[in-house]
Structures are given as structure tokens and as C-alpha cells.
Amino acid sequence: MKVLITDKINEKAADIVREAAEPVVLPTMDEDELCKVIGEYDALLVRSQTKVTKKVIEAGKNLKIIGRAGVGVDNIDLNAATENGIIVVNSPDGNTHAAAEHTVALMLSMARNIPEAVKSTKEGNWERSKFTGVEVFGKTLGVIGFGKIGQHVARAALALGMNLVVNDPYTTKDFVEKFGGKYVENLDDFWALPDFITVHTPKTPETTHMINEKTIAKMKDGVRLVNCARGGIIDENDLKAALESGKVASCAVDVFEDEKNIQDCVLRNFGKNVLLTPHLGASTSEAQINVALDVAEQVKDVLSGGNATSAVNIPSLKPQKLEPVKDYMSIAENIAQMAAQISKGNLKNIEIEVKGSLADLDVSPLEVAILEGVLSNNLVGVNYVNAPLIAKSRGIDVAVRKSHQSTDYIGSITVKLNCDKESAEVSGAMIAEHIKRIVKLNDYSTSIKPEKFMLLVPHVNKPGMIAQVATVLGTDNVNISRMQVVQKSFKKDALKTDEKSMMIINTDNEVNAETLDKISKIDGIYEAEFVKLNV
């Protein structure tokens, strides 16, 4: 396997990647240049300079993972990556301190006119009155986006004696109040409160031009703005107009809508009340090393068969969601694979039921594992990244039901595939810590370890059945590693009740169609089925 590293990522990243694949370090390339070479690589590591477009992603036929050494991923086409089953990871924590410190530095520099004062003094001037600033003590800082960077900035602001107001749809009032701030749920109610506003959100359709003519009009007169997050969150033309009118007293901007053509930025010609820096938020020696090491570790882990810790296009597999249910992921996938292989006809919908301890948890990661298990039975290239998207595109409805009904297990999962010919229902459970078992196959209760090769043989419960099946397998050189026989009762007619049993056999190798046909022709055997699981 090969990994392409570009955009001058710290050289230590290559050392980590080398544990799983061959790293190749090349300069930053444009779209056409990248498309010519990307097909031979299994992974791509970039910073912000490389634009990983849909065209690049589709040319990357072998790509499994794209790593962004930094927080933002707006230079990567996430939809295209997801559609092609490619994991996209970033480093959400590697530059937290650097970005937060730069935000505070800009805020203080802006408040005290430090850059212009330095320039003037170096020119031999002594203009103290010209650079009179304002104190931040006692002022209110408004933080939009209360993730790790926003929280770090907030701590510094509180230490400086500032008041704190926060808007973030992904946090809670209790959390912000315990932190020492005031939570404002509605942005319309937020704008008029702060003296200083700083944004720490990703650039999305919802946050693009979040700060514009209309929202600026709702702010205090003389408000001061800081943006160290993403260019485009502030409408630069509207900010220019607000600076000219005096509505905005000053601003400090580190990120821009068009950073390649900064000479065209409308904010460049302002004086001391506009402070501009060239996207320095993550530009510390420590941060550059941290983000490089973080994404390199994730690329190494994924290429080695492990999981990514910061996948941005698999939201349901974020560590905080995955951790409580991670022990159930493999059994969820296995029972889904089995259900897909023993059902018949076109899939109409999927029903999932969780019981026991799982009923109290967010089971969305298990839903992803089940979708992957079901869809991979008939489709190539399905994985945890694109399974939900494929299911949605094909109109597959998924219903999840939780039950607190007591069971014999710590937690159990049931997958039912409703099909137009023959439906299937399979249950899995943890019978003890780290011990997974398939506990139900349609109407048969069982307890058998999921293994790579499994043979299901429904039969009439009479002497000699096991011996005949074993003889066929032995003759065809298929070794039985484990077997269980389970029974169910059913009514053939109103007067008789026959016993129907099933042999569930783990084998050491695949059972081919010819052997299955021989077994199915034994008198008293119903249709035998061979199941192959990813274990």
C-alpha cells in the first residue's frame, strides 16, 4: 500500500505511516496533476492547500482514507468521499491551543491597537494618544461555537475578567452555566449582548455569511469582531460597510473568503481598526507536529484494519457514540450478514430491536454496522462510510425499536429483514463480557459462536440425520469444527404436530454448491444453506 503526503506536512507523519504503508512525499499539486497520480495511492494526507475535489476522489480508485492535518475539511469534497466509501479524518484537537491563543492574541491586539502602535514606534514616532485602546475587563465576549477551541478561548476570557455569552446548538444551558457563562439558544437573541464576538464553527451552508448586514445591524454599536475559524463565515463586503459606518469599531481576521487572492480582499485598506493575519491560527511548531501525528496515526490504523478516531463523514461512529456500544459492533454486523443470506427476494425494509442494557444507549453506530452487513451481501464497496447513504438512495426504511424487557443477556440485538419472498430474523447477544453469540435464527433459539463459515441444515427430527450430513461433509473434505442441533415445533395440519430441527454447523472451509445440493437431497433434509461471515 502507498500513501501520498503533500502540502509540507511535518516529516514525522511519514515515519508513522511507514508502519503500515509506503509514504510518498510530493509538493502541492493542482487538480489535474493530482488526478494523474492519485490512482496508485491507498491514502492521501493534506493540509489546506490541496483541493481534494470530486474529480480527484473519483480518480483515486484505491483511496480508502483522506487525512486533513488540521480542523477544517472544506478543501475536501465530503459528499464525493462518502459516496465512494472513503473515510475523511481530521485532527480536531491538534491545534486547539494554538488557535485559541491566536484568537486571544488578536482580540487583545485589536483592543489595544498594538500592530499599528508597533509600526509607528519603529518608524521613530511617539504617538501615545493616537493609539488609546479599550479594556476587555468587564466587557462581554460572545462565543459562537463552543467546542474545544471556543471553550479554551472562554477560559482565557473569564480569567481576564470578561463576561461570557455562548451560542451553540450542540451544547446545553447547564454546561455553559457550569462553565461560567450565559447560554443563549437563539442567535437573534445573541447578537445584541456581546462587546466582542468570536466565531469557532466549521464553514457549512448554515454558517456561511452568518455574520452579514442583517446580523451586524442587531449587534451593539461599536462591537468588535474576531474570526480565526473559517473564511466566509463573515461576509467581507458587509463587514467593510459596517466598519466604514462605525457600527463595527474594529475587527481581527485570520481567515478569508479567497486566501489565494488576498490582494483583492476589501478589508486590506483599513488602518488601525482592522487587524489581518495570514491564516496563522494553527501556525505554531507544536500544532503542526500535533496535527500531522494525529492524522498519520489514523491513516496507519485504518490501513492496518483498525478504526479512525476523528472521521468527519461517519458522524454515528464518533468516539463518544461508539465507545458505549463498540463491543456489539461485530455481532450486529454478523447477524445482519446472516439475515441477508438466508432471506429471499427483494428487501422491503429493516427492523432492528435492541433489549437489555442497549436500550439505554445511542445505538446509531449499531445501525450503521447492520446496514453495512445487509448491503455488502449483494453490493461491492459497501462500508461504514457509505452504507447509510446507499440505504437512503435505495429507499430502504430502517425502524429501530428499544425494549427494556428483561432478557437472559446483558444486551441483545435482533435484525429482521422483511422481503417480498421470504423474510429472515436473526438475534445476537453478549452472554458474558466479550463473549458474543447468535441466539436466534428465525424461530430457532440457539447459542452459537459466529464464525466465518456456517452451514444451516433444517431437517426432520429422526435418527441418522446428523450421521448422513457428516458423511457428505467428510467425503467432500469439509471439516466440522463445531455443531449444535436446535428444535422448533410447528403444526403441519390441525391434527398433527411434527418436530423440525436445525443443525447449525461451523466448518473450517467453504461448503460449495455441489456439496450443498448433496445434503439437500438427503431424505428428511429441507434446503441447506451456507453462510459466510466477516469475523
Image (cartoon, rainbow, N blue to C red):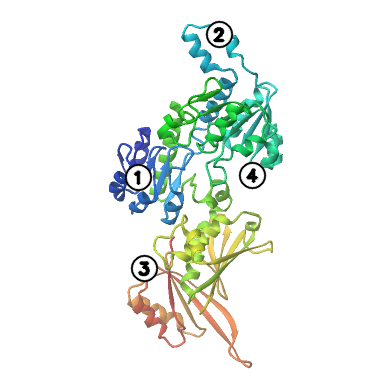
Q: Amino acid at mark 4?
A: Pro
Between 176 and 240, the one lying in front of the other is 240
Tell me whether the residue at label 1 lies in contact with that at label 4, contact meaning CB atoms closer than 8 angstroms.
no
Question: Which residue has dot 1 on it?
Answer: 20
**Of callouts 1 and 4, the N-terminal one:** 1
Give whichever of 82, 31 is nearer the camera: 31
Local secondary structure at mark 4: loop
Dot 1 amino acid type? Ala
Q: Earlier in the sequence, mark 4 or mark 2?
A: 2
103 w.r.t. 326: above or below: above
Q: Which-is-in-front pick, marks 2 and 1?
A: 2
- Quick check: 340 left or right of 412? left
Between the residue at mark 4 and the residue at mark 2, the CA separation in whole angstroms equals 45 Å
Give the spatial CA distance, label 2 vs label 1: 60 Å
Rendering coords of residue 387 (x, y %): 48, 59
**Residue at 48% of width from left, 70% of height from top?**
340
- Please tell me in which quadrant of the rendered image residue 429 appears: bottom right
User: Which mark is drawn over residue 127?
Assistant: 2
